[in-house]
Amino acid sequence: QVRLVASGGGLAQAGGSLRLSCAASGRTFSTYTMGWFRQAPGKEREFVAAIAWSGGFTDYAGSVKGRFIVSRDNAKNTVYLQMNSLKPEDTAVYYCNRHPPDPNYWGQGTQVTVSS
């Protein structure tokens, strides 16, 4: 069974940092572009960041550019999201998936809550 498990969320103060991890199991994702997405209460899920299979190309939503950094370790089949200078509006459930996302690979996500 293919699984993408996001972890590392929690409670942070505004201006703080968190590092999310996305571990893949059941198959290798090292040849795919991977993405991070988030869904805030009452809002649709939105794109946050993406990284090409080689790590040589990254893309960010305008709202997180300059604050978040996406990276990956293909040997560990894991993708990371370093979140710095957090803002209350970053509060959401964060998910990882292929990019563009595959509906079969949405996991449970990890909750990030940023207090002001």
Image: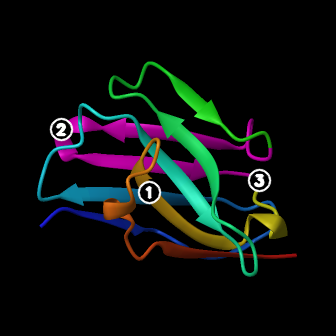
Q: Position of residue 13 (x, y in %)?
A: 76, 72
Q: Residue at x 11, y 59 (%)?
A: 26
Kind of residue sitting beneath label 3: Ser
Image quarter of the C terminus:
bottom right
Residue range of the region highlighted in magenta in the rendering: 63-84
Mark nearest the camera among 3 and 1 is 1
Query: What residue sits 78% from the left and 39% below the top?
Result: 62
Q: State the image coordinates of residue 76 (x, y, percent, origin top left).
A: 20, 46
Look at mark 3 in the image and give the residue it sits on: 85
From the top left corner, tell me how far across and down residue 107 is, in percent: 37, 70
Q: SS at mark 1?
A: strand
Closer to the camera, 14 or 95? 95
- Outermost residue, front direction? 103
Residue 21: say if magenta. Answer: no
* Label 2 element class: helix
Amino acid type for the residue under numbered disc 1: Cys
Label placed on residue 114: none
Asked if the residue at tag 1 contacts the one at tag 3, i.e. Cβ–Cβ closer than 8 Å, the answer is: no
Q: Earlier in the sequence, mark 2 or mark 3?
A: 2
Magenta region includes residue 82: yes
Q: Which residue lies under the disc numbered 1?
A: 96
The residue indicated by pointer 2 is 75
Which numbered mark, 2 or 1, is in the foreground of this view? 1
Q: CA distance from mark 2 to mark 3?
A: 29 Å
Mark with earlier residue (3, 1): 3
Quadrant hosting residue 103: bottom left
Would you call the spot at circle 3 few (<14 residues within 10 Å), some (14-19), or many (20 or more)? some
What is the total number of numbered labels drawn onto the structure image? 3
* Above or below for 4 versus 60: below
